[in-house]
Amino acid sequence: MNRKMIGKLLGFLLLLECLFLLPPALISAVDGEQVALKAIFSTMVLSAGVGMALWLGCRNAERSFYAREGFLIVSLGWILLSAVGALPFWLSKEIPHYVDALFEVISGFTTTGASILTNVEAMSRGLLFWRSFTHWLGGMGILVFLLAVVPMGKGGYSVHLLRAESPGPSVSKLVPRMRQTAAILYLIYIALTVICVVFLLMGGMSLFDSLCTAFGTAGTGGFGVKNDSMAGYSPYLQTVCTVFMALFGVNFSLYFMLLLGRFKQAFLNEELGVYLGIMFGSIAIITTNILPHFGGHFRKALHEAAFAVSSIMTTTGFATADFDQWPQLSRSILVVLMVVGACAGSTGGGIKCARLLLLGKSLTARIRQILHPRSVNLIRVDGARVSEETIQGVNTYMAAYCAIGVVSFLILAMDNLSLETNLTAVLACLNNIGPGLDMVGPTSNYAHFSDLSKIVLMLDMLLGRLEIFPLLIMLSPRAWRRAS
């Protein structure tokens, strides 16, 4: 195992986190928030000091490493960044309990949006910005950012980092060099974020609110700067978020295809068809179902249904209405959408439409095999054959997903809260959504859970964002042995 390379890259990540804390520090300085500024500055010094020590101590590391090191770097990196990123909230006493501060930051970095805060608007603007900024950083991936900006030499090992952090059953290069792939992904991400900010500004939203809202929309995270999330904003601003949440739930490789002029290949993508089909179908059913709830006002019902579906399916978690009060059918559809999630290669969470597509095709192929034992049933997506390794990976992921969900649900049951609260809390955290139903609904929070339950939910958030396996590999003793 290349332990020095692991230490070197972790050092790089801490140095980057020091830079990421600069914008909230400047905001606190301009606003005269002395307590918040001191907490942020202390964290920056700690992050820079530890990061530099790790980098200097491991600077002579061999450049080559393999999949095992890639998974370990991603897992340790996310945990370390979260542990340090929670310090400004804790040191400033704006979140006095460190477990709560860690919960908030892990929720931010994993783009979950589950919060323990009861009064968001009471927080200082510098820390409020940092809270939302973690969404944007975690959306595309911090290691992807590292690959995009830091020259790491030759060797081709960068793919292990990208595959370990990127959501979805597989990651392919957009261009031959992996660093260029990471840079392209981030440029598209930045461009869409800037466009989102412009549209929000055009609707009269302040620059600060526009940036924080765009961070939550782009990262599909859902941390708001208002206690009522998005409910207090105009229908225009809510519609902008509806559209952009859906756009950030699309596989970013399709945007690259559009830039190259491959319109047919992009629009005929099978996963995109599944994603849009589920989204529009859900909007239609929920609109019809909640129509009496809004006094027969079709446009209002359609507006609320579209926002809720776009928010939940892309695992963003913004809210304009308390959908926990909607009819049972609508609430049930939203719970299903929590599990479905967005596209692979997007900033959204959930199981991903790509996995559902592969599971459906695999089931169909299996039925045909049973009916016609001598037949050859190949699974193809977009005309390309899917390998058995990919199918096996999807099946293994689903088995692990179900097992983790069950264990988490049983541990949360010790808090003696309602079944609906515990089940949707696990689904909301494991799928990186945020709001669930009942006591974790869109108008509630996670403050009432015990520390043990919060730790379980934090692990669920990390497992969901990192696609389970990197964290499980980190916890395996075999992964730390010097010989494979």
Image (cartoon, rainbow, N blue to C red):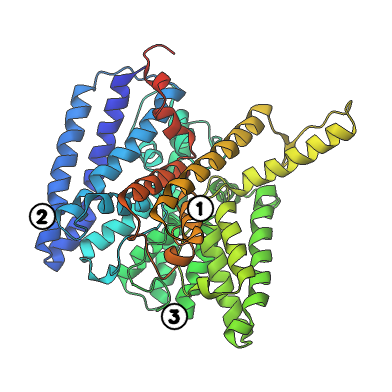
Give the residue at mark 3: 234
Residues under numbered marks 3 and 2 in contact, where contact means CB atoms less than 8 Å apart? no
What's the residue type where badge 2 is placed? Lys
Q: Tell which circle, 3 or 2, labels the residue nearer the N-terminal end.
A: 2
Q: Does residue 224 appear to the left or right of 389 in the view shown?
A: left
The answer, for residue 10, to whether it is visible in the render is yes
Alpha carbon separation for disc pair 1 and 3: 30 Å
Circle 2: is it few (<14), some (14-19), or many (20+) Cα within 10 Å? some
Give the residue at mark 1: 427
Question: What residue appears at the point 56 percent right and 76 percent down from the top-left corner?
Answer: 303
What's the residue type where badge 3 is placed? Ser
Give the residue at mark 2: 38
- Assign the N terminus to one quadrant of the image: top left
Residues under numbered marks 1 and 3 in contact, where contact means CB atoms less than 8 Å apart? no
**In the rendered image of this protein, does residue 144 appear above or below residue 64?**
below
**In the rendered image of this protein, does residue 86 appear above or below residue 370?**
below
Residue 484, image x, y percentages:
44, 13
